[in-house]
Image (cartoon, rainbow, N blue to C red):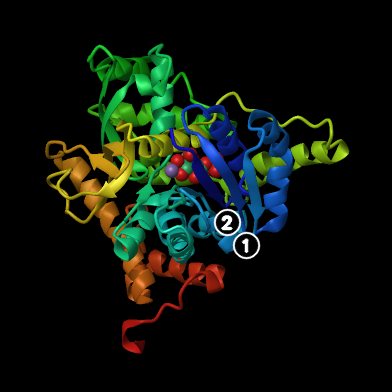
């Protein structure tokens, strides 16, 4: 089995310890020859490395480890790029959440005007830059991109790179599958073959086949309708705030029992109820800053107190790390395992446009994802998806064309937004908040 060189881009993230943990725990399924950690924030980068190096050194003695803020060093001689950046940091995540909320609109990391449009236009140039650098220094590398908002980013990388050796992927379907498998008493999320269609953070499970070939979705639906989502997956998706999402999940199933939804549909199907539950003075970004980030800083404090005796913290399980390592392993060793990934439609969903970036099952081969095609989807789901797709495509148009008008359309058409007047107010505030992270948007008659 060949050995692989991996660079984690955005390695200063609170998710990186979990990704490193998965990479090392799966060392027999995905052999490593080098691990590079890259971030533009040197302090954060070293903080993560400090708390993980004991585990790295003990599990993988002799592994080449590179910790760098230098692009050439990071991307040279690399087989896999794991890109999971947050452009603008949690500070701008907070504005993405609070600005729409000020006007009574859903304020969410990846959904609505703050999530898809604001964060999208910030992420696009950063991801394009990463991919260009990766391809410059390691032309044959694979880029596994799970930077958000994945739907918008995937559309931008489709336009810029035709998604050559780029796999856009999200952990949410895996996290949900893990909950399902626990509820059904199965030992792993891979015990279920999912049938699924949608866009990223916007899709539905239509069947879940177990190893005996039986569709377990009807049984699971009954369990959810009677007792709710009783299991949740990993440490990340178990926290107090995520519990609210799992509670709402059962409500979605009650109203729309045909398929099992991606939990993010709550923001589109119950927008006003979600807004009513949100607190503009304490949005999710604040919780992440106060909880997950502080936890990491506290670990680092422990490390500083006694670097020689410090032991890296290991989590019970990390979906965020595990699924990305499994996907890389499927590419590296041509395993053809089934994953839910974001790919260009090209007929996979026959009644959606060919150039839509859709989330469907695919068999991951060394030459890339081989998507599964499904029967035509029902009117309700098609209508929802077409609306959301238009918003996402317009956000990408707005970025590439520097167009204020397209950005306004992207927001106004979004299902979470009630009127154009509100859309314009949100857009104008987002322009101020994003500053140089955004291109300068011009009105049609100014161009
Ligand atoms: C899920 C999604 C990710 C998202 C994350 C946010 O895992 O798939 O795309 O970034 O949730 O979680 P947080 O705990 O940061 O709100
Ligand atoms: Mn995601």
The residue where tag 2 is placed is 74
Q: From this view, report whether residue 408 is shown above or below residue 25.
A: below
The residue where tag 1 is placed is 70
Q: What element carries label 1?
A: loop
Judge by depth and name the residue closer to the eye, 79 or 348.
79
Q: In which quarter of the image is residue 194?
A: top left
Residues tagged 1 and 2 counted as in contact (Cβ below 8 A): yes
User: Could you tell me residue 331's position as x and y percent?
Assistant: 36, 39
Q: Looking at the image, in which quadrant does ligand 2 appear?
A: top left
Q: From this view, report whether residue 360 is shown above or below residue 158.
A: above
Q: Residue furthest bottom?
A: 446
* Quarter occupied by the C terminus: bottom left
Picture residue at 54% right of the left edge, 34% below the top? 23
At label 1, counting other C-alpha atoms closer than 10 Å, the crowd grade (few under 14, some 14-19, many 20 or more) is few
Evaluate whether residue 51 shows in this view. Answer: yes
**Would residue 393 be found to the left or right of residue 188 on screen?**
left
Q: Residue furthest right?
A: 305
Evaluate whether residue 263 shows in this view. Answer: no
Judge by depth and name the residue closer to the eye, 439 or 25.
25
User: Could you tell me residue 436's position as x and y percent?
Assistant: 54, 73
Picture residue at 20% right of the left edge, 48% below the top? 383
Q: From this view, report whether residue 300 is shown above or below residue 392.
A: above
Q: What element carries label 2?
A: helix
Judge by depth and name the residue closer to the eye, 2 or 364.
2
User: Could you tell me residue 347's position as x and y percent?
Assistant: 14, 47
Picture residue at 44% right of the left edge, 50% below the top? 110
């Amino acid at each position: 089995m060949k050995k692989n060189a991996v660079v984690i881009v955005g390695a200063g993230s609170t998710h990186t310890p979990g990704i490193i943990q998965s990479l090392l725990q799966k060392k027999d399924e995905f052999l490593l020859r080098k691990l590079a950690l890259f971030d533009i924030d040197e302090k954060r980068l070293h903080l993560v490395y400090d708390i993980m190096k004991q585990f790295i050194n003990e599990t993988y003695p002799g592994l080449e480890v590179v910790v760098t803020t230098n692009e050439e060093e990071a991307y040279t001689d690399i087989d896999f790029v794991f890109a999971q950046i947050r452009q603008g940091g949690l500070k701008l995540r907070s504005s993405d959440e609070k600005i729409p909320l000020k006007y009574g609109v859903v304020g969410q990391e990846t959904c609505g005007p703050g999530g898809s449009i604001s964060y999208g236009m910030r992420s696009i140039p950063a991801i394009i830059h990463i991919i260009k650098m990766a391809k410059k220094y390691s032309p044959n590398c694979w880029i596994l991109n799970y930077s958000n908002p994945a739907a918008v980013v995937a559309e931008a990388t489709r336009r810029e790179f035709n998604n050559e050796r780029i796999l856009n992927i999200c952990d949410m379907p895996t996290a949900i599958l893990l909950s399902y498998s626990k509820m059904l008493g199965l030992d792993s999320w891979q015990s279920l073959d999912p049938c699924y269609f949608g866009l990223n953070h916007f899709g539905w499970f239509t069947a879940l086949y177990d190893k005996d070939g039986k569709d377990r979705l009807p049984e699971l639906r009954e369990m959810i309708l009677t007792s709710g989502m009783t299991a949740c997956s990993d440490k990340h998706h178990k926290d107090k705030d995520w519990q609210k999402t799992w509670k709402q999940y059962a409500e979605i199933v009650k109203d729309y029992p045909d398929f099992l939804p991606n939990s993010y549909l709550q923001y589109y199907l119950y927008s006003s109820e979600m807004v009513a539950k949100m607190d503009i003075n304490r949005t999710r970004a604040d919780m992440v800053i106060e909880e997950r980030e502080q936890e990491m800083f506290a670990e680092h404090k422990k490390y500083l107190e006694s670097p020689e005796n410090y032991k890296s913290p290991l989590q019970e399980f990390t979906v965020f790390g595990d699924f990305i390592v499994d996907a890389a392993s499927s590419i590296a060793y041509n395993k053809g395992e089934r994953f839910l990934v974001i790919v260009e439609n090209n007929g996979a969903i026959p009644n959606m446009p060919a150039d839509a970036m859709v989330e469907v099952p695919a068999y991951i081969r060394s030459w890339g994802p081989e998507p599964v095609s499904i029967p035509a989807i029902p009117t309700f789901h098609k209508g929802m998806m077409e609306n959301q797709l238009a918003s996402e495509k317009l956000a990408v148009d707005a970025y590439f064309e520097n167009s204020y008008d397209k950005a306004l359309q992207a927001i106004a058409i979004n299902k979470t937004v009630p009127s154009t007047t509100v859309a314009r107010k949100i857009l104008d505030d987002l322009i101020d908040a994003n500053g140089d992270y955004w291109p300068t948007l011009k009105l049609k008659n100014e161009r």
